[in-house]
Amino acid sequence: MRKLANRFYMGLVFLFLYIPIFVLIANSFNASKSRTVWTGFTFDWYRKLFHNETILKSLLNTLIIALIASVLATLLGTLAAIGIYNMKKFTRNLVINITYLPIINPEIVTGVSLMLLFVALKIELGYVTLILAHVTFCVPYVILNVLPKLRQMDNNLYEAALDLGCTPPMAFRKVVIPEIMPGIMTGFLMSITYSIDDFVISYFTHGATSQTLPITIFSMTRRKVSPEVNALSALLFVAILVIMIIMNVSEMRKLPSDQRRRAAKAEKKGGRA
Amino acid sequence: MDKNKIIELKGISKAFNGEQVLKSVDLDIHDKEFVTFLGPSGCGKTTTLRIIGGFVTPDSGEVLFNGKKVNHVPPYKRPVNTVFQKYALFPHLNVYENVAFGLRLKKMKETEIAAKVAEMLDLVNLRGYEKRSVTLLSGGQQQRVAIARALCNEPKVLLLDEPLGALDLQLRKEMQIELKKIQQRLEITFIYVTHDQEEALTMSDTVVVMNGGEIQQIGTPQDIYNEPINAFVAKFIGESNILPGIMHEDYKVEFAGDNFVCVDKGFRPLEPVDVVIRPEDITICPPSDTVINGLVESVIFKGVHYEIMVRAYSDLWKIHSTKAPEVGSVVGIDFTPEDIHIMRKMENSEDYAALDHLNGEEAGTID
């Protein structure tokens, strides 16, 4: 009985969480423009969506910016993580806390301050400022994903590579990078999702021709919510969902080997006793 | 210059964060020698090994390989390879690729690599494991891969940093014998770091006993065991009775309240010394047959022998014997002049502190 109540409660929570999204997805297939009456199933809105120049342009913008910003953020973040890892304890803690700042800072503050900075530096708002802004908020996620991998790594691995004939850059490429690769990949995928997702910061840092998808959607809904927006939002939701699934599946795949490693360790301990 | 010397350390000192880890260490290592650095943790043995490997640069002194100074030569240019304490295998590579790692860097042909890897895996009895993931191997197997990987580059010197520390006793003993065989077969120099005195005595041609950043004694296992140079070495290598004494003249020493004939000479008249007698060198006899009599305080069965503690005046004697006297009985303690080892007093108070520490550990194991 109690179990049933628990399940019912959990069901309610999920219902409230996801009903808006399902309503939106359902409406994107609704033949009627009304959001309350169902008049039949249609792909019209999707068809219209893919003939809408503004939307397609901003989708392209979003993807290009997400890709460039994520690649840059991953490079910067990985190098930063390695630097932070090799710092002395005090400076390390200090720098880690500073890297947290962009994450806890309200987005609107980050957005406004970046805009003010770009204006002060006389950089024209556009692709460059958007990419710079996206790199800024993506870097911390990369650092926070790469650092734990560095901590897990056996320090002797790097030395072993040197010992076997690697120069320091080679040792880094052949041993350190493969070891922390899962962290780098997670950081990269997170950067992409956050970049595609971002509205507030992009809103303050985009130029006239560099609108991203969330900004276009926002400006479309300001006039009236067109069913095309439903279709677009549904597509965005599915795209983000797919990336999340990829991330989780790749995590899951790595899990068994970790578990096996742990099992081997436990066995060793048992043998010693 | 002696042609036989492959590595020379001259006056090597090293401090970490203001703490002196090595104090002017001098050491020659010869070709095809199995050298062991033996000492308690923190004695500087691993740092010495890392200096030879090129992972640590000494603050002062010279490191010579074949007579050439290599202080600032990086690890990847030294003709040495290392077996690390925690194996340090590359988890993203399988057994084959781990062993082939050094060969790939040399841009060898694939067929040559395959032949060399097969040879190395044969050497460490891991044939057939090529495709296995190193993370799925047992500790002993990982150790073998690490050895094969290090030997693949055909180093002139192999450095081993407590390589068997994580293995269970049985496996450790097997690996000791195997390592010694590998060393003899390949005819290269092994430098081995351990805190296990039995391991050091079993495997080595030369044992270097270290403590507090200084070399205490260098010698063959027999030398180190039979003629320890000071109380620290005597205590660290095997069990000992160490008694304060006075050297009256050559071949005549006073300790435990009596004068004894011994085989040592060359001390100052009336020089205070440490007298070492190994527990297994002492015979228990009827009290009337000898000058030292004592009360049996405890008898513990140790398997091969009994460990008998006998109190004679203020001295507590540890004796190993296959026959057990009764607790509370009075027995005689007998030994020959050859069993008496006379050692100069250690100058350094730190060494005595380390000695106390060892005594403490031993007391702990008796409980």
Image (tube, coloured by chain):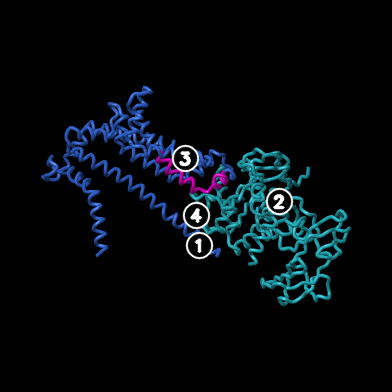
For disc 4, the chain is: B
Residue lying furthest top: A122
Q: Residue at x 37, y 42 (%)?
A: A189
Give the CA separation, mark 2 to mark 3. Answer: 42 Å
Tell me which chain appears cyan: B
Q: Which residues are magenta?
A: A140-161
- What's the mark number on residue B135? 4
Label 4 environment density (alpha carbons within 10 Å; few <14, some 14–19, many ≥20):
many
- Give the foreground label among 1 and 2: 2
**On the rendered structure, is A241 left or right of B71?**
left
Q: Choose the circle earlier in sequence order: 1 or 3.
A: 3
Q: Amino acid at mark 3?
A: Ala
Give the CA separation, mark 1 to mark 2. Answer: 41 Å
Residue B105, by quadrant, is top right
Picture coordinates of residue A121 (x, y %)?
Answer: 38, 23
Q: Which residue is mark 2?
A: B350
Q: Which residue is mark 1?
A: A267
Give the CA separation, mark 4 to mark 3. Answer: 25 Å
Q: Residue at x 21, y 40 (%)?
A: A231
Give the tally of numbered discs. 4
Q: Which residue is mark 3?
A: A81
Q: Choose the circle earlier in sequence order: 4 or 2.
A: 4
Give the CA separation, mark 4 to mark 2. Answer: 43 Å
On screen, B30 above or below B176? above
